[in-house]
Image (tube, rainbow, N blue to C red):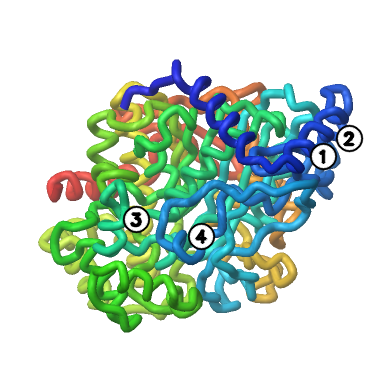
Amino acid sequence: MQLKSNFVFIDRLLRKVHGMLKYSLAALLSTLIVGLFSSPGMAASFETISTDSGVFSGSKSRHQPGVNVFKGIAYAAPPVRDLRWAPPAPAIPFAGVRQANNIGPACWQMRNPDNSLYARGNLQRSEDCLYLNVFSGAQTESASLPVMVWFHGGGNTAGHGGPLIFDGSNLAARGAVIITANYRLGSLGYLAHPALTAESKNDSSGNYGILDQVEVLKWVQNNIENFGGDPDRVTIFGQSAGGTDVCLLMSSPLTEGMISGVIGQSPGCIKLDRRLDEGENSAHVGGEAFASRLGVSGNSSASLAELRSLDAQVVIATPGVGGSTIIDGWVIPDAPYDLLESSRHNNIPVMVGGLAHEYHGLQHTADEITEQGLDDYLQGVFGESAGNIKSGYLDSLASSPLDARKDITTDNSFLLAARMWGRLVADRGSNAYVYFFSREAPVFRLYMPEQTDLYGDGGQRHFGAYHSGELAYVFDNLDLVGVGWDDDDRRLSKLVADYWISFARDGNPNGDGLPNWPSYDAQSDVVQILDATIRTEEHPKKANLDRLEKLYMESR
């Protein structure tokens, strides 16, 4: 993919003019009046900002007084009625000044149990959920700070951009503008169906959650200069499903010219191979089966109208779609591996990695299994190579068959995907920086600070470096969430946050006072170990990852 950078400025200008033309006269007058009192020398008035849909009034961060915060900004129209299962439409313009002090509702999702690390409590949920939050470390509109856009995890079926753990104040205070955003989830975000494809001018359906993320990036291009951000330095970063999504956004032609770097935390996009209309497992087949469960059959416009008339809670509670992204020929034109291998992607630097014990968190409520149960699992996943894979995990097996399965799954999913992504980018001439996060974090409810202590034990480190255990470190929010932190945790958190900001600023995590982080080279397989002591060494999981990657490549 060749970046058309010489057209980006013109395109951005045209989109801004188009946005201004959408204003009512009252909204335009409000913008002009605010502008009179928003000169670069008046930092206090920087709490009131004009956008292409209207004027928002924010507030000073409670955690970093030098950071201005704007919460609950609509970046698109509510995706309801005819906009359900459609690409996002521009936000609806409004007159006057709107307060931006509260996060918007989360997108529809099922409530998960409170005994989970990943419990989110009883969220306010709505189809009207396409909102973002801005944390600006700028004091004037001319600051031109690097921008970081965060997409949350949750399997593309859960989560939102507003939890305290994602408060961007401490990152923004380092000299950046941080954005966190919601996007459609589950069946409301990823349903593909022949009737939807027939309706689409792009012969595509599904991937609406990804299209929401693209719309966030368009919003950034149109508006971020007013918040003191640089639209030419936009890094997207995400974790778990969000890490997968930023990999897909990097590979999509729809983001050309809108992103300058990508940080993928525990991603899983490399092996994505499900297509819109090929085979028994196609997204169309799955979509028709899902509609049938809802009592809707056929592929006519009337069938589609019937689906759109259903209650959102009923739709989201019906199994069968989940948050699976699809190779649809438009948003994702081909398998991500093939796009990266053939350089049909945004040629930009990448920082990517995973944690040592991802599935020790994800499966922390799983029941123990027997060794025969482990063998059955291995046979189902690896076939005749099951014994070869098992031989690399005898130490884990000595602990328990369940621990062995957790470690194998960790390596075969997140860690393998991260290393393969780094290799593909490096092999094609862009810089990649690969990390291995091995700090064993305290165990706590990540998203419920009012009920942080999961087991009432002060946050003992039961699960090692578990899935999502790095989030508080990345946002440098150890003083806002969690329990049981120590001085080593706080030192690591500051260094990790500095690495992330340095990458957003320069496309390179290295900076003054930071331990050197070399760019990735597959021959040496040297990665940055993020732990109480940061060090650079050969990937600790190299032997097993080499074995797993060989099997994957042979199966392609």
Label 1: which secondary element: helix
Label 2: which secondary element: helix
Q: Along the polypeptide, which appears first: circle 2 or circle 3?
A: 2
The three-letter amino acid code for the residue at tag 1 is Glu
- Would you place residue 121 above or below residue 102 in this image? below
Label 4: which secondary element: loop
Give the residue at x 73% y 23%: 143
The three-letter amino acid code for the residue at tag 4 is Pro
- Would you place residue 108 above or below residue 369 in this image? above
Q: Position of residue 524 (x, y in %)?
A: 33, 29
Q: Along the polypeptide, which appears first: circle 4 or circle 3?
A: 4
**Where is mark 3, residue-wise?**
325
Give the residue at x 52% y 25%: 507
Q: Position of residue 492 (x, y in %)?
A: 64, 42
Query: 213 and 444: which one is in front?
Result: 213
Q: Are marks 2 and 3 in contact (CB under 8 Å)?
A: no
**Where is mark 1, residue-wise?**
47
Q: Nearer the viewer, mark 2 or mark 4?
A: 4
Q: CA distance from mark 1 to mark 4?
A: 29 Å
**Where is mark 4, residue-wise?**
79
Give the residue at x 51% y 64%: 80
